[in-house]
Amino acid sequence: MEALYDELNAAPLPMPACSMKKNGYHICIIGGGGTGGALAYDLALRGFSVTVLEKGELTSGTTGRHHGQLHCGARYAYGDRNIARECFEESVILSRIAGSCIEYNGGFFVALTDEEADFEKAFIEGCLESGIPARKVNKEKILAIEPRLGPVKTGVFVPDGTFDAFRLPMMFFSAAKLLGARIMPWHEVVGFDIANGRMQAVIARDLLAGGRELRIEADYVINASGAWAGKIGEMAGADIPVTPAPGAMLAVKGRLVDRVISRMRPPSDGDILVPQRGLTIIGSTQRVTDNPDGILPTEAEIEFLKAKAEEMIPGFTNLPVHAAWAAARPLAGSRKHKVGNTVESAVIEDVEGRSLSRDFMILDHAANDYIEGFATILGGKATVLRAMAEKTANFISSALHIESECRTASYSLPSWREYFRGGRS
Amino acid sequence: MMYSIQIKTQDGTRQYALEASPERTILDALEIIRSGGEKNLHYRHSCHHGSCGTCGAVINGKPRLMCLTRLGSLGAGTIVLEPLSKAETLDGVAVFPGRLFDSLPNTDYLKNTDGSAAAIELAVPEIRYRDIPELGAKPKRLEDCIECGLCTAACPVSKDFIGPAACAHIHIETVKHPETSQTLLARAFEPDGAPACERAFECSRICPQGVAPGKHITALLMTRQVRGTGH
């Protein structure tokens, strides 16, 4: 920890301009969301050849629809200090390597009820024990800084922020592209070539070329398709316990606060206000569904979110809705192993979804489904995308028995604009 | 309500019909149609709330963001969607915005907010990390321009022109960082820079973010006039 913070206090270096020395291995990543982008960059920086397949535009699934809260970890500190600690480290790293698309202004956890105020002590303790500098701020000071907030009893200042949910992941894609990764949006995975218990190739369709089929041979295939991971798994005959969990969000025009506002209580629905550019976003809700495609917010969700925002900012409901949308987050269900290679389908312990682990996991299909060279990454949070990529790239390196080192925390990322420059790759 | 949507490209037209609430957006409608099994419907989208700038299209003749255009706002009749002009069309309304991003310089994407710096003394515990948010710091926010290319598509200039968004980027940067933006400023005065503007101001009318690129172009041209009188 100490060493990491010392390192973080050094300015990030510019990313190496030329490609790394290639190590001869080719990795195919399925899914062009934030995780896929961060992984493509991490692997390319280690010398892997990388191909990313995405059925639509990059970040068009769940990634771009995030409200953009850069979690310092305070929200998780009470429940899981390890997650909180990692969130804080990663939020600091992202602010340093991708600061150009982050509004790093901090956040307040506010108590609106006596019950929430009673939670304050435990909340601050949880933060401090997780290494997060949380400070009690009294009501008068909070209202002087964020005058639109309603009847706040007390609050805590934490180092939260807001990132641009499109541009942050696109910075990783820019970096991957500059390092020679082949990024292929508009390519839908339709099957796999698995022979002798080993992943040989991914079969994809070029959707802009009338569905022309391509065969992409790879030494390792990573399913990073999030809420779509189950559908991809089916094609390979692997059972992947993931449940698409739509969450609705709503934005009004006007920057009602300058800092992220969270309720001082364990995570629940409608408890976060995120300022972003000239908007204020209230998030979010959670339900579960079978199909991650075409997710839209319901009227009930919209009304619920407005009412929750009104509790924090009186007058919120009078503002016209700028946009209401929903994103299919991937919820990892627990799985049970039977004798042999059959696996029970996902056991979802709580249909509301909130209590399911939101931690990150790597499912090795060699161990679970007898497919060598294939793994699925699941769960996690947007703020920790770089760390998820690091863990996954370590895992791939170890599976391929090669030594490699993660260096993504050391370099500042190029602009998101680079991805679109210089023609289509 | 029943809605009829026509996607018009150089290769022909495709017609879709759907039942949806007038509160739903054009982007929602395309999502409904595609998830209903229409595999050959391609469009760019990401944030669904007017922040990413990917879902621009010409809607009933006017460049707009699909995610912020409600079905009920368009009146009766078939809704006609076309790809943004001056961009490489991929399929349907999906474009590759390469030319736009080739023209956009890398500028400081953060600016100060209207919010007050909290001039409040706090007992601050010793913090070892550099650059984490401080309560007393002046808040910053992302720039308004979402690089959606609607202004470029609406601009009637047909000769070489870096476009309204690039000019706005340059002007904003020169105001924010005058000392480091002289090279950029020079770029704005090349023949395909601000001087190429024909003052139609379609860019300012069409901008979904109120950036008013026309205003920035005018300001850029004024700086040269002011400076020019000195010679």
Image (cartoon, rainbow, N blue to C red):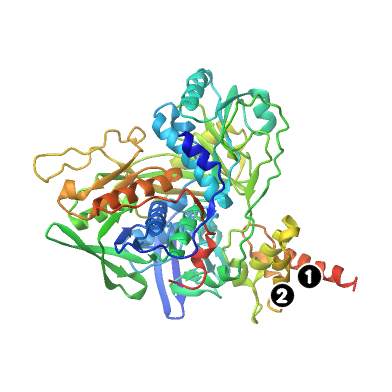
Tell which tag, 1 or 2, sits nearer the viewer: 1
Q: Is residue A298 visible?
A: no
Which x, y percent locates residue B41?
38, 67
Q: Residue at x 25, y 46 (%)?
A: A363
Q: Which residue is mark 2?
A: B197
**Residue A246 left/right relative to B178:** left
Q: State the SS at label 2.
A: loop
Cα distance between the residues tagged 1 and 2 = 10 Å
Mark 1, residues whose alpha carbon is within 10 Å: few (<14), some, or many (≥20)? Answer: some
- Return the residue at label 1: B221
User: 10 Å neighbourhood of mark 2: few (<14), some, or many (≥20)?
Assistant: many
Q: Quadrant of the N terminus of chain B?
A: bottom left
Q: Amino acid at mark 1?
A: Leu
Q: Chain of mark 1?
A: B
Task: Name which of mark 1 and mark 2 comes first in the sequence.
Answer: 2
Label 2 near label 1: C-beta < 8 Å? yes
**In front of the other: A343 or A194:** A194
Check the image and report above or below for A64 versus A379.
below
Place of residue B167 in the rendered image (x, y in percent of width and height, measured from the top left): 68, 67
Respond whether the residues carrying marks 1 and 2 are from the same subunit. Answer: yes
Q: Image point 68% across, 45% down: which residue?
A: B113
Looking at this view, is A226 or A86 the one in front? A86
Q: What x and y, as percent, mark residue A131?
A: 49, 30
